[in-house]
């Protein structure tokens, strides 16, 4: 294929507009390279697109318009174009939507050069106002980073004149700063930490893969605290030494600051960051420098997978089992699987690190598709926590309390020794249900088929489906009786209330994502707690994700049974992972840890597997069950959600599709449903679910495309297809 198109030649341009086709244009003055970013006219607008290939020439040549100009950015490489095409085909996502994922960068069309940024100045303003305080707080929160005017004003929730006023008084500095400077070079030759024998062996195997320059996938399995990070940082070092770029994906932004410090200690400089917590200026710089080779390591969230790497040689997916790698709206993709796809296209090594891998990854390693490296021991002096179950049927505890006498005693002993305890409950808010004791009414969301959850700190009821909030009413909205509304069941806030009553002198810290205004505020709080600024930590699954609390020696899982109910395919797997992860928080430094699971069904096979620590036996049993049922990873699934403002049209379309299932049957697939979704109404839309199931090896995507090919979505109907669904709500 021609790589360069002369001015006036026909080019095919893909834009992020929902058009479902590549449009023909004439190459702009100076011509354009394949993959170049170009600005083109679209109706009355100017939009940015990518030269995807030669034009198709099936339009009236007189009507083909000329592209305006080539944008000053590195052309999109063939590797990324192929990745977007294949990822789109796999997830049944239109190519335009895939391009959107790869071009989510501010100021793509703007020329490089200088621009004004705002930093904290030396003097205090003469008069302090609330608005001024907020601006200064935002600047402090972002440390030394400069923000552009609009971003600073937006973050502080003030008008730009407030910022300008502070500049006039010297409290904020306005400086000209060059755009998009390269990141400081990371030095792979600096000595790393001393590795144990197991770590050194694993690091060597990964380094070998990196030096081969070819694609390879590895499961790096190690218990929490076994030093997986040190091992994959050696793979990063090998990648940098080979002159290639590396990407480390983390499941939680709050984890990045600790990780960045470790990178800095290892390589002498900080890497580029890509996630929702970085400034727009930094996002633009990261995107540009990755494409031009001015950044060698990116640490980021799942969307970093779509960055325009110049020479990607390594992708690490830390905590690969984490459900946050699955994007659940818009383009439905699993970053773990897509990382393997991109790695195979670009010839990169893909490392999936976890103490409790997903069953998919475990099975791929078992089948020999992935290399498996095990880190059996905990690093240094730390040992795995002892695990015990508290049989809640035998504990003397009133129905409105949740911390058992056994657990209370253990916490008391920790406080006396100056150690930290963690109470884990995977439920945000105060109480999951608010019920009227006069009429039995439960307060629900107006837009969803979900109960409103009381958030007492914010004094609001909140719907966890759509985010709708309302004040907590005095009177029952159903019967009007005042003072009879009661909270039922525990959330972390209620647990905190109980802990405060039992341990009035203890310092409590509640870690729940909704209690922090920004990722940075959460990060800061986690650092304080790690330094010892709490006796009892009360947290949701946020705390399960790899934070280091050196003084923590006790974990109490308040409701270990919580994940066991429900018909979710992965209920057992998730409970197993979560409980192992949470208990892994204890005893990471010198003091040994212990984890207690409060359970009403201590003999349940999952609880028993967690206690025994016989992981391989658990995975094998779980795999055998899925295989017998033909479920993933031994069979294939696609989830179909049809939604509409009224229930009937959604259901009718489902029935029509179920009857016209010839294309699916021909391919060897089966369709189940339609059935009302477990949450039958979200944001005012009624939802109907269908499930397509097929044996492994069936060309599921093409069968579904054929099956859905003829349908017309009218009257507010929407249909989404989720290949390899992770959630079934
Ligand atoms: Zn009532
Ligand atoms: Zn709602």
Image (cartoon, rainbow, N blue to C red):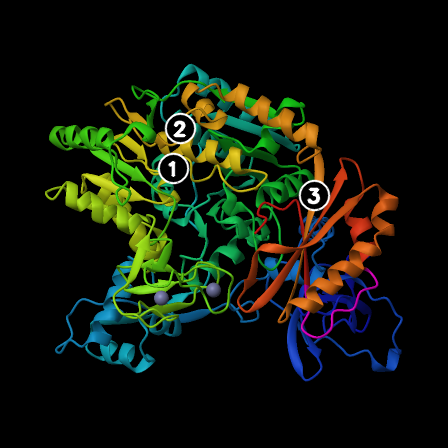
Q: Does residue 138 lie above or below 382 as drawn? A: below
Q: Nearer the viewer, residue 227 or 548?
A: 548
Question: Label 1: which residue?
Answer: 546
Binning the other alpha carbons within 10 Å of mark 1 as few (below 14), some (14 to 19) or many (20 upward) gives many
Comparing 577 with 488, the one in front is 488
Q: Nearer the viewer, residue 714 or 85?
A: 714
Tag 3: Cα neighbours inside 10 Å, few (<14), some, or many (≥20)? many
x and y, in percent, of residue 323 in the image: 51, 44
Circle 2 residue: 224
Can you say which quadrant of the picture contains the N terminus?
A: bottom right
Q: Which range is magenta?
A: 709-718
Residue extending farthest bottom: 44
Residue 257 in picture, x, y percent from top left: 35, 46
Name the residue that disc number 3 marks. Answer: 637
Does the Cβ of the disc 3 residue fall within 8 Å of ligand 2? Answer: no
* Mark 2 vs mark 1, CA separation in Å: 8 Å
Q: Are marks 2 and 1 in contact (CB under 8 Å)?
A: yes
């Amino acid at each position: 294929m021609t790589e360069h198109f002369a001015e006036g030649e026909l080019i095919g341009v893909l834009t992020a507009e929902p058009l479902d086709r590549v449009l023909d244009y004439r190459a702009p003055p100076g011509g354009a390279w394949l993959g170049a970013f170009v600005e083109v006219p679209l109706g009355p607008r100017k939009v940015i697109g990518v030269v995807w290939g030669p034009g198709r020439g099936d339009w009236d040549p007189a009507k083909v318009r000329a592209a305006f100009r080539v944008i000053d950015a590195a052309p999109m490489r063939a590797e990324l174009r192929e990745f977007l095409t294949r990822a789109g085909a796999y997830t049944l996502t239109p190519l335009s939507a895939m391009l959107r994922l790869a071009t989510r960068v501010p100021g793509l069309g703007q020329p490089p050069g200088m621009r004004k940024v705002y930093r904290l100045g030396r003097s205090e303003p003469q008069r302090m106002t609330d608005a001024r305080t907020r601006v200064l707080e935002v600047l402090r929160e972002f440390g030394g980073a400069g923000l552009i005017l609009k971003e600073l004003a937006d973050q502080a929730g003030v008008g730009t004149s407030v910022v300008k006023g502070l500049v006039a008084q010297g409290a904020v500095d306005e400086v000209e700063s060059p755009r998009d400077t390269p990141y400081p070079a990371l030095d792979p030759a600096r000595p790393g930490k001393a590795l144990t024998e197991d770590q050194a062996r694993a690091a060597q195997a990964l380094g070998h893969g990196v030096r081969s320059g070819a694609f390879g996938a590895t499961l790096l399995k190690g218990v929490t605290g076994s030093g997986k990070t040190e091992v994959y940082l050696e793979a990063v070092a090998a990648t940098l030494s080979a002159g290639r770029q590396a990407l480390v994906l983390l499941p939680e932004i709050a984890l990045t600051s600790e990780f960045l410090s470790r990178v800095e200690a290892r390589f002498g400089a900080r890497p580029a960051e890509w996630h929702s917590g970085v400034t727009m200026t930094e996002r633009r710089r990261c995107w540009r420098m990755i494409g031009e080779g001015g950044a060698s390591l990116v640490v980021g969230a799942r969307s970093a997978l779509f960055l325009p790497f110049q020479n990607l040689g390594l992708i690490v997916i830390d905590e690969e089992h984490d459900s946050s790698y699955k994007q659940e709206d818009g383009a439905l993709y699993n970053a773990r699987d897509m990382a393997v796809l991109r790695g195979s296209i670009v010839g990169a090594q893909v490392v999936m690190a976890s103490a409790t891998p997903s069953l998919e990854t475990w099975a791929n390693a078992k089948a020999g598709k992935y290399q498996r490296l095990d880190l059996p021991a905990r690093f240094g002096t730390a040992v795995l926590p002892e695990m015990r179950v508290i049989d809640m049927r035998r504990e003397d505890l009133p129905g409105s309390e949740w911390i058992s006498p056994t657990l209370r005693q253990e916490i008391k002993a920790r406080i006396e020794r100056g150690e930290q305890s963690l109470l884990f409950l995977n439920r945000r808010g105060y109480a999951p249900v608010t019920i009227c004791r006069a009429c039995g009414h439960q307060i629900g969301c107006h837009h969803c088929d979900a109960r409103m959850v009381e958030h007492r700190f914010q004094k609001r009821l909140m719907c966890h489906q759509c985010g709708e909030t309302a004040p907590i009413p005095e009177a029952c909205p159903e019967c009007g009786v005042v003072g009879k509304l009661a909270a039922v069941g525990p959330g972390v806030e209620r647990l905190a209330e109980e802990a405060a009553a039992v341990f009035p002198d203890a310092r409590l810290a509640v870690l729940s994502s909704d209690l922090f205004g920004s990722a940075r505020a959460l990060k800061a709080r986690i650092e304080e707690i790690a330094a010892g600024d709490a006796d009892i930590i009360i947290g949701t699954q946020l705390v399960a994700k790899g934070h280091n609390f050196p003084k923590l020696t006790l974990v109490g899982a308040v409701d270990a049974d919580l994940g066991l109910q429900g018909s979710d395919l992965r209920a057992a797997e998730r409970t197993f992972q979560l409980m192992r992860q949470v208990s892994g928080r204890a005893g990471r430094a010198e003091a040994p840890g212990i984890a207690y699971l409060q359970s009403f069904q201590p003999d349940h096979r999952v609880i028993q597997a967690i206690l025994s620590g016989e992981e391989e036996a658990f995975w094998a049993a779980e795999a055998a069950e899925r295989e017998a049922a033909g479920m993933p990873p031994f069979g294939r699934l696609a989830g179909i959600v049809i939604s509409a403002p009224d229930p009937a049209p959604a259901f009718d379309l489902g029935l029509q599709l179920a009857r016209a299932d010839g294309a699916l049957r021909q391919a060897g697939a089966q369709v189940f449903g339609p059935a009302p979704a477990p949450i039958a109404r979200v944001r005012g839309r009624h939802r109907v679910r269908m499930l397509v199931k097929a044996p492994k090896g069936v060309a599921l995507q093409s069968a579904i495309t054929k099956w859905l090919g003829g349908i017309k979505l009218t009257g507010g109907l929407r249909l989404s297809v989720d290949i390899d669904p992770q959630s079934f709500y």
